Every structure is written in C-alpha cells, then in structure tokens.
Amino acid sequence: MQTHLRPKRPFDHVDFAQEFLRRNPDYQAQYRNIISGNKQRATRDENMMMARTWGLEFPRPSQS
C-alpha cells in the first residue's frame, strides 16, 4: 500500500471520513469489485450506488 504524504495541518471531519473509508476493507472490496476487469473508472451509476452505500450523498440546496 502506498503512503501519501499530506500537508501538516489538522484533519477536519471530511479528511477523517476520507481516511476512514480509504482504509476500510469493505469499502476497498466494493471499489475493487466495481472497477474489476479492464475498467479504469466506475460508471456514474456505480459511483452513485457506492456513494449511497457509504453515506456520501448530500442533498443539493434548493434553487429558490
């Protein structure tokens, strides 16, 4: 596994969540499954499904 150096600053909530998911074996397995075969990237639908699974979907603000 590669180590990515980050700037020296405190993690905020988004950073913490990203690091948690990046290290989570279930998240890694789902991602590997989505990009299995010769695919380099997941489709938009696959990305949306994965986002919903892991609580990464946020409602858009209303356009009033």
Image: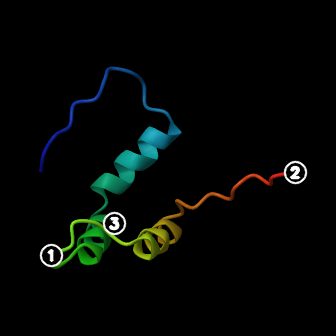
Residue found at x 15% / y 75%: 38
Check disc 1 and give the amino acid type: Asn
Nearer to us of marks 1 and 3 is 1
Residue at the farthest left position = 1
Q: Picture coordinates of residue 45 (x, y %)?
A: 46, 75
Decide which of 39, 58 is in the foreground and name it: 39
Task: Work out whether mark 3 precedes mark 2 in sequence or the reverse, and give the earlier one.
Answer: 3
Mark 3 is surrounded, within 10 Å at the Cα level, by few (under 14), some (14 to 19) or many (20 or more) other residues, namely some
| Residue highlighted by disc 2 | 64
Look at 52% across and 59% down and name the residue there: 56
Residue in the foreground of this view, choosing between 19 and 32: 32
Q: Is residue 45 above or below residue 8?
A: below
**Location of residue 31 (image quadrant):** bottom left
Q: What residue sits right under mark 1 in the picture?
A: 38
Above/below status of 37 relative to 18: below
The residue labelled by disc 3 is 27
